[in-house]
């Protein structure tokens, strides 16, 4: 290198030994949002119970005349279920205190009423949709019983089911070698003259390849929410946040292992450094 000084030689040597450009990958942060509200704490339960008791104690007398018209069958059933208070007679002694009757109610105590049952219990309904083909009006009046918050997937600890932990946010993780991580897809080569794919498109194509096309989801944004510099693999991982709406993840390769986990479960499953890097992206709910 005639005419090249020592400083120029150092720059040329640095460029010649420079590491190759890092690989670009799109990492999918696919989550299932909570389906039911969270369980309230014991303090909240006690608070709401207290407020309910205060409200019932101070509430105005139930307007039975509005809901149960005098002389109707409903009024007769209501009167059979609710015995009136002891009348306040002037010539009678009351050891526990004289009744304070207002609108057919003893105002010394909260009003507790029973109303006629207008529905059928679950065992009273005799309906087979395959046999009968349609419901009658009496079947439609059956008692509404809410579903259990604890599902069969919770009882069997089926981490591959989306029907578990209904009050929490679940995240999809897949096993990469011996480690669990979020699904990551490398930048795809493009033909000459074609435009490069966006990071959200790379994530979509990668999810279709490993989990099928039965998943209905949407990306929160086309802009990555986080960048992870993976110096060990010389890779830059751009995180794309998405939410699943319906469908299920069906592995296209039988050897692929996956899980739907909460934030606390991810802490015990993901590599420690990896989790610390992306912990702020995860929901506490």
Image: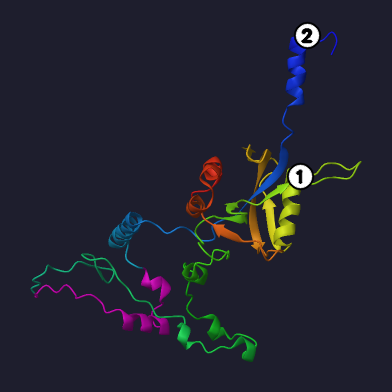
Point 58% across, 53% down: residue: 180
Up-down relation of residue 53 to residue 138 (above or below): above
The local secondary structure at tag 2 comes to loop
Q: Which residues are magenta?
A: 63-92
The answer to whether 251 is drawn above or below residue 91 in the figure is above
Horizontal and vertical percent position of residue 196: 82, 41
Q: Nearer the viewer, residue 142 or 12?
A: 12
| Residue at 72 percent of width and 40 percent of height | 24
Which residue is located at x 41 percent, y 85 percent? 73
Residue 223: x %, y % from top left:
69, 40
Answer with mark 2 or mark 1, whichever residue precedes in sequence: 2
Q: Are marks 2 and 1 in contact (CB under 8 Å)?
A: no
Can you identify the residue that label 1 sits on?
Answer: 187
Q: Is residue 81 magenta?
A: yes
| Horizontal and vertical percent position of residue 165 | 50, 61
Apparent side of residue 201 relative to residue 29 in the rendered image (left or right) = right
Q: Is residue 128 visible?
A: yes
Quadrant assignment for the N terminus: top right
State the image coordinates of residue 224 (x, y, percent, origin top left): 67, 41
| Left or right side of 33 for 196 | right
Separation (CA) of disc 2 from disc 1: 40 Å
Residue 86's quadrant in the figure? bottom left
- Is the residue marked by circle 2 packed among few (<14), some (14-19), or many (20+) residues within 10 Å? few
- Is 221 in front, or is 120? 221
From this viewpoint, is residue 32 visible? no
> Which quarter of the picture shows residue 114?
bottom left
Q: Which residue is mark 2?
A: 5
Which-is-in-front pick, marks 2 and 1? 2
């Amino acid at each position: 290198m005639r005419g090249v000084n020592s400083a120029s030689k150092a720059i040329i040597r640095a460029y010649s030994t420079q590491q190759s450009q890092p690989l670009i990958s799109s990492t999918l942060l696919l989550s299932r949002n909570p389906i039911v509200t969270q369980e309230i704490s014991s303090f909240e339960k006690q608070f709401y119970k207290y407020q309910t008791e205060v409200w019932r104690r101070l509430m105005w007398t139930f307007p039975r005349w509005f809901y149960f018209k005098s002389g109707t069958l409903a009024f007769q059933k209501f009167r059979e279920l609710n015995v009136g208070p002891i009348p306040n007679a002037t010539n009678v002694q009351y050891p526990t205190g004289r009744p304070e009757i207002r609108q057919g109610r003893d105002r010394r105590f909260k009003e507790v009423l029973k109303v006629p049952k207008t529905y059928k219990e679950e065992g009273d309904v005799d309906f087979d949709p395959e046999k009968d083909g349609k419901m009658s009006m009496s079947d439609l009046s059956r008692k509404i019983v809410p579903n259990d918050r604890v599902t069969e997937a919770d009882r069997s600890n089926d981490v591959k089911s989306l029907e578990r932990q209904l009050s929490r946010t679940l995240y999809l993780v897949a096993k990469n070698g011996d480690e669990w991580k979020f699904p990551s897809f490398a930048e795809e080569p493009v033909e000459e003259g074609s435009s490069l794919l966006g990071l959200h498109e790379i994530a979509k194509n990668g999810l279709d390849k490993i989990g099928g096309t039965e998943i209905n989801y949407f990306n929160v944004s086309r802009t990555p929410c986080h960048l992870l510099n993976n110096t060990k693999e010389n890779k830059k991982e751009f995180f794309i946040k998405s939410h699943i709406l319906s469908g299920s993840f069906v592995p296209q390769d039988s050897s692929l292992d996956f899980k739907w986990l909460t934030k606390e479960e991810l802490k015990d499953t993901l590599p420690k450094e990896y989790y610390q890097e992306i912990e702020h992206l995860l929901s506490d709910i």
